[in-house]
Amino acid sequence: MPYIKHQALKIYHHLSDFKKLENAVVTIGTFDGVHFGHRKIVSRLVETANATGGETVILTFFPHPRLIIDPENQELKMINTINEKAAILESLGVNHLIITPFTRDFSNLSPDEYINQVLVDTIGVKHIIVGYDHRFGKDRKGCMEDLINAGKVQGFDVEEIPEQDIHDVAVSSTQIRRALLSGDVALAATYLGYHFSLKGRVIKGDKIGRTIGFPTANIFVEESYKLIPADGIYAVTVDLNEGSFKGMAYIGQRPTINGMTRNIEVNIFDFSQEIYGQDITMTFMEFLRHDVKFTGLEALKVQLQQDKEDTLAFFNKMSN
Ligand SMILES: Cc1cc2nc3c(=O)[nH]c(=O)nc-3n(C[C@H](O)[C@H](O)[C@H](O)COP(=O)(O)O)c2cc1C
Ligand SMILES: Nc1ncnc2c1ncn2[C@@H]1O[C@H](COP(=O)(O)OP(=O)(O)O)[C@@H](O)[C@H]1O
């Protein structure tokens, strides 16, 4: 995604680190993926701040409240890591990002305490943009009307995001997650407005790749909450210290060699350096095929040559 250079986004991991603003233009939400629907809300935020000489603030909860309320449910994976989300929000011109853990104490604040202590006293809210169905405070008892009434007393405006827009945001997030989990990274990109990527550290594998002429960098993704696309083979671009390259990625258990772990690997084209320990980013451009159990490494090697041709053909088609 083309990043326009803005003033650096300030990130806070605790509400207590935040210095109250004169004129805070605030919105609240997870913004996972920062897709088209989210960006519409963020534009409203930035426009309002520009028009009133205010500063934009996004209040987000991490880990996701659903993981606190239902800790057994580790199924909910995120499209963006916190760092990815911050980079996108910065590119959109957001000034402040508060990432607060949704702790028991926090969730026990009454609606009034939440408005007064968090929004007014800590952040300095003058304008807040929230969904029509926004709920807050202990047992989600606070609603839009409470916010509007408090705003009249405390001196802040409340702007409601209409039902249709909230619906579109939820539908897009679900569609993006579903597309990625089924391998359709191209469809996910049409909803996201950019291509999904995975960043991780190159770790050691079984060193079989090089013996068949296709060394593959194995990636460890630190953020266990990050969504990993479906098993399969993908055309990717790879960004690392040495520059930007094309490549073909594999996600799967390597049935051909009876692998036991789910690996994320990439064979980088026109590249031959040792990169163990480095961070690399893979950007998923197209799904090529499903994972297959071959009769042996020779058959796998033949297929890898075909995959490379298919990947190059895809990139050729894309550039024409
Ligand atoms: C583009 C690509 C496609 C792959 N396709 C398959 C596959 O269909 N089935 C399979 O068992 N392994 C597949 N692999 C994984 C290989 O088995 C793996 O790269 C090889 O065993 C080397 O592992 P190593 O990195 O631990 O040395 C693929 C790897 C790449 C890079
Ligand atoms: N073109 C390339 N693509 C991926 N990794 C490469 C490439 N050339 C060299 N390497 C290096 O080789 C390693 C992969 O070789 P491989 O035999 O598959 O070992 P491992 O099983 O440890 O991943 C990578 O981690 C990287 O350091």
Image: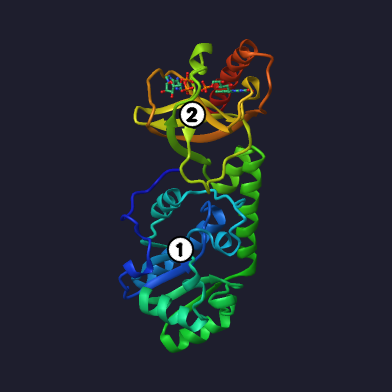
Task: Give above or below for 7 relative to 155.
Answer: above
Which disc is residue 10 wearing?
none
Which disc is residue 218 wearing?
2
Task: Residue 157 in the image: state x and y as whole percent.
Answer: 46, 79
Give the amino acid at mark 1: Pro
Whole-number angstrom distance, CA of label 2 to CA of label 1: 31 Å
The residue closer to the viewer here, 175 or 181, is: 181
Residue 50 seen in this snapshot:
no
Q: Is mark 1 on a helix, strand or loop?
A: loop
Residue at 48% x, 46% y is 223
Task: Residue 269 in the image: state x and y as whole percent.
Answer: 47, 20
- Residue holding disc 1: 101
User: Which is nearer the N-term, disc 2 or disc 1?
Assistant: 1
Callout 2: CB less than 8 Å from ligand 2: yes
Mark 2 Cα within 10 Å, few/some/many (few <14, many 20+)? many
The residue closer to the viewer here, 261 or 294, is: 261
Task: Give above or below for 94 relative to 185.
Answer: below
The image quarter containing residue 250 is top right
Give the amino acid at mark 2: Asn
* Quadrant of the snapshot with the C terminus: top right
